[in-house]
Image: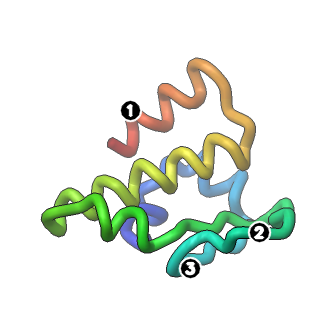
Amino acid sequence: MTLAIETLPSWVADQLEDTIFRVEAQQRVLEPERPEHRITLYRQPALTQAATIPELERLVRVELLRAIVRQLRLEGPQAVTLASACL
């Protein structure tokens, strides 16, 4: 995940400067509401789906981008710009 974060465009990194990134094995059944400045990615779904390391890296990057789009409430052109820069 570190590599995926390091390759984010500067305008995204600036908006996420106070955000805490966490990786957990899997999502809990009764997950409490997540704090506003936290992004949590879950390891197990990506490990289950990926057959190769490059595929795993791509899945992590896609999930990170989805989380960032939700966190920053990006829409339309901004979300497309972010995806184009990172995928």
Callout 2 touching callout 1 (CB < 8 Å): no
Q: Which mark is residue 84?
A: 1
Q: Quadrant of residue 4?
A: bottom left
Q: Please rate how many residues cluster around mark 2, counting C-alpha atoms within 10 Å: few if below 14, some from 14 to 19, many from 20.
A: few
Q: Name the residue tied to disc 3.
A: 24
The location of residue 73, given as percent across then percent down, is 74, 37
Residue 22's spot in the image, x, y percent?
A: 61, 76
Element type where label 1 sits in the image: helix
Q: Quadrant of residue 59?
A: bottom left
- Residue 34 seen in render: yes
Q: Nearer the viewer, mark 2 or mark 1?
A: 2
Residue at screen point 38% across, 32% down? 84
Residue type of the residue flagged with mark 1:
Ser
> Residue at 54% of width from left, 74% of height from top?
26
- Disc assigned to residue 11: none
Q: Element type at marker 3?
A: strand
Residue at left 77%, top 69%?
A: 30
Q: Is residue 71 above or below residue 24?
A: above
Residue position for label 2: 31
Q: How many marks?
A: 3
Circle 1 crowding by C-alpha within 10 Å: few under 14, some 14–19, many from 20: few
The amino acid sitting under disc 2 is Glu
